[in-house]
Amino acid sequence: MKPYKIALIPGDGIGPEVVAEGVKVLKAIEEVDKNISFSFTTFPWGCEYYLKYGKMMDEKALDLLKDYDAIYLGAVGYPGVPDHISLRDLLIKIRRGFDQYVNLRPVSLLHPDLTPLKAKSEKDIDMLVIRENSEGEYAGAGEWLFKGNPEEVVLQTGVFSRKGTERIIRYAYEEARKSNRTLTSISKGNALNYSHVFWDQLFEEIGMEYPDVETYSYLVDAASLYFVTQPERFGVVVTSNLFGDIVTDIGAGITGGLGLATGANINPEKSYPSMFEPVHGSAPDIAGKGACNPIAAIWSVSQMLDFFGLEDWGSAVLQVIREVLKDKESLTADLGGRATTEELGEYIIEKLIK
Ligand code: NAI
Ligand code: MG
């Protein structure tokens, strides 16, 4: 059988530590399921590479990556390299170049102790945030005029194309229909009088084709409040690039923090590889100590398996994460446990192949 070809970009800081655990999970699956095989190629890109070669990736990076089935990324970022360079010249280049216009971020509470919200349980916090990932407020369009002068002006332009807005909203409707859940659009049409009025209009327009999907539309400020007061309002959520970035961090906050949050960058047409990564960064404060939590990165593996159509394994991995979270001793320090990154990774694998 043909192996799924996976490109690994472990990156910086704790990136390599968590990616190593995710790869072990995939290797364990390949070991027990003879119908599945994976091949891995590691690319040494990131900030250390930048300090050596003056660039975050090889110039031909996209060419080198384009024939893989998926990219598995750890994190990039390193003291000494400006964050806008590490982010824009690697992550954003891949997301853009491979038209990964869907960012899928599950916000699901996997164990009741993990939420700081009183009286909320797993059934209350179980949403899928679908963030526009290719344009919007992060399009990088704008101007910096009269730099350094008293009349200095900067413009940061949101780019909302019909094609870009339609396809993300349509993807969300499809997802809501498929999973039989409500769909909530988060926007800010009252203040962003072009871009988000347009967004709201398309949300309604496309909704005509999905009369079976129950919809809600909230302003982002109200939605942020509901995330923490009434998260049970949300099923599938669709929102713009900037708002998605922010509300998913609230999502991480109500479900156990960055050690657990994952996100997939999807090119639904599969014209290019999709990219799977934990939401957290390179965590220089704890890097190299074997102390970081590998669960977010392992949840990314679960998303990757789902994307490959191996949903049985995808849900098995997620189920094991749920189980492991019941056993506090087995967790890393961020979740109050005493395990090292590797110990927790091994514990997850042990349970998975049982
Ligand atoms: P961060 O996510 O690296 O760390 C924030 C806090 O969460 C730190 O205290 C860290 O120790 C903790 N943390 C994060 N992941 C953890 C894990 N798996 N287990 C246990 N604790 C964990 O964000 P920060 O500090 O703002 O940024 C550090 C660097 O990472 C910067 O250079 C930034 O640009 C980069 N970054 C990269 C991202 C990416 O590659 N996707 C995303 C976010 C930040
Ligand atoms: Mg973010």
Image (cartoon, rainbow, N blue to C red):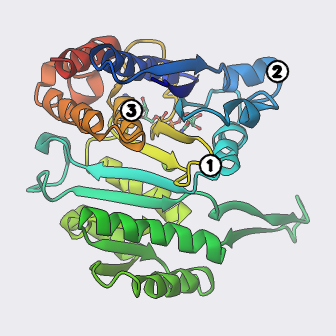
- Crowding near the residue tagged with mark 1, few <14, some 14–19, many ≥20 C-alpha atoms within 10 Å: few
Q: Secondary structure at mark 3?
A: helix
Q: In 3D space, how far apart are the residues under numbered discs 2 and 1 (Cα atoms)?
A: 30 Å
Count the numbered circles shown.
3
Which residue appears at 24% of the width and 68% of the height? Answer: 181
In the image, is the residue at mark 2 within 8 Å of ligand 1 by its beta carbon?
no
- Tell me, yes or no, whether the two marked residues, 1 and 3, touch with CB atoms within 8 Å: no
Instruction: Quarter of the image for the N terminus: give it.
Output: top left
Percent coordinates x, y for residue 291 in the rendering: 36, 17
Q: In 3D space, how far apart are the residues under numbered discs 3 and 2 (Cα atoms)?
A: 30 Å
Foreground: disc 1 or disc 3: 1
Is residue 350 depicted above or below 236 in this figure?
above
Which residue appears at 29% of the width and 20% of the height? Answer: 33
Relative depth, front residue between 23 and 217? 23
On screen, residue 320 versus residue 188, left or right, reads left
Q: Which residue is mark 3?
A: 301
User: Which amino acid, mark 2?
Assistant: Tyr
Query: Does residue 164 appear in this view?
Result: yes
User: Which amino acid, mark 3?
Assistant: Val
Dot placed on the residue nearer the N-terminal end, 1 or 3: 1
Foreground: disc 3 or disc 2: 3
Disc marking residue 53: 2
Disc marking residue 104: none
Instruction: Quarter of the image for the C terminus: give it.
Output: top left
User: Which amino acid, mark 1?
Assistant: Ser
Which residue appears at 43% of the width and 52% of the height? Answer: 104
Relative depth, front residue between 69 and 160? 69
Q: Which residue is mark 1?
A: 271
Is residue 117 depicted above or below 43 in this figure?
below
- Tell me, yes or no, whether the two marked residues, 3 and 2, touch with CB atoms within 8 Å: no
Which residue appears at 73% of the width and 20% of the height? Answer: 49
On screen, residue 305 versus residue 65, left or right, reads left
